[in-house]
Amino acid sequence: LLVDDDSPIPEDYKFDTISVNGNHAVSSYCYDDLMDMIEDCKARGLSPVICSSYRTLEKQQSLFESEVQSYMQQGHSRETAEKIAATSVAIPDTSEHQLGLAVDIVDINNQRLETEQEDTDVQKWLMANSWKYGFILRYPKDKTDITGTIYEPWHYRYVGIEDAIKIHNSGLCFEEYLGLAGKVDVDISDVTKTSTKKTTTTTRKITTTTKKTTTPSKTTKTTTTSLKTST
């Protein structure tokens, strides 16, 4: 299921959520594989921290409206403010986090959402192994002209183990894999996303399982027109 500005979440898309460490939640489709991945990462002596996961429509609306208001206070009209806000916060019903299948994971030693996150030990391990658990790095560095989103070395999307293996082996991004790749005519050379927000972490022992699931899929034609972040 591809979700972006031109392909909003279908009204009939339903799923159950499961709490993760009491602070976050994800879709039941990906819970077991996510827990396996996190626990295996920890078993290597690393400390991954989930800093963002499932968001309700109301939460996404609140985040977007807050961003809009901040630009309106700078003197922009609402129409202009909404356009600017959409470059940093996903329009409600177009965020992957609303699917319950996306998680932002950082290293406990560096919890800033910036490109340097790729240099942390946690990200090095996740980038090399997440596909084994059904997750893909959703917005790769060399695919920004296709995804329309800046490089985010913290945002992982669950697509199911079978599809993740194929995507990993092919070197394709999600849009290319679905046959919906388009080019974005935007200069991204100076585009970065930085956050100084820190997260707290809790420890919980999870017994790993080997349940393997795949997500429902839906192919929707899309044309990306602007570079954005996936918040």
Image (spheres, helix red, strand yellow):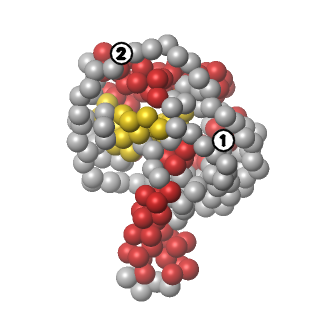
Q: Which residue is mark 1?
A: 1
Using the rendered view, name the quadrant where residue 46 is placed.
top left
> Foreground: 141 or 93?
93
Q: Residue at x 37, y 82 (%)?
A: 73
Q: Residue 223's x, y, as percent?
A: 72, 55
State the residue at coordinates (41%, 39%): 25
For disc 2, the marked residue is: 207
* Numbered circles on residues, count: 2
Local SS, label 1: loop
Residue 42 rendering spot, x and y as whole percentages: 30, 21
> Who's the residue at 23% across and 42% down the image?
200
Q: Nearer the viewer, residue 141 or 44?
A: 44
Q: Amino acid at mark 2?
A: Thr
Per the image, label 2 sits on a secondary structure element best described as: loop
* Above or below, comparing residue 198 to residue 168 in the picture: below
Amino acid of disc 1:
Leu
Classify mark 1: residues with Cα within 10 Å, few (<14), some (14-19) or many (20+).
some
Q: Is residue 203 left or right of residue 96?
A: left
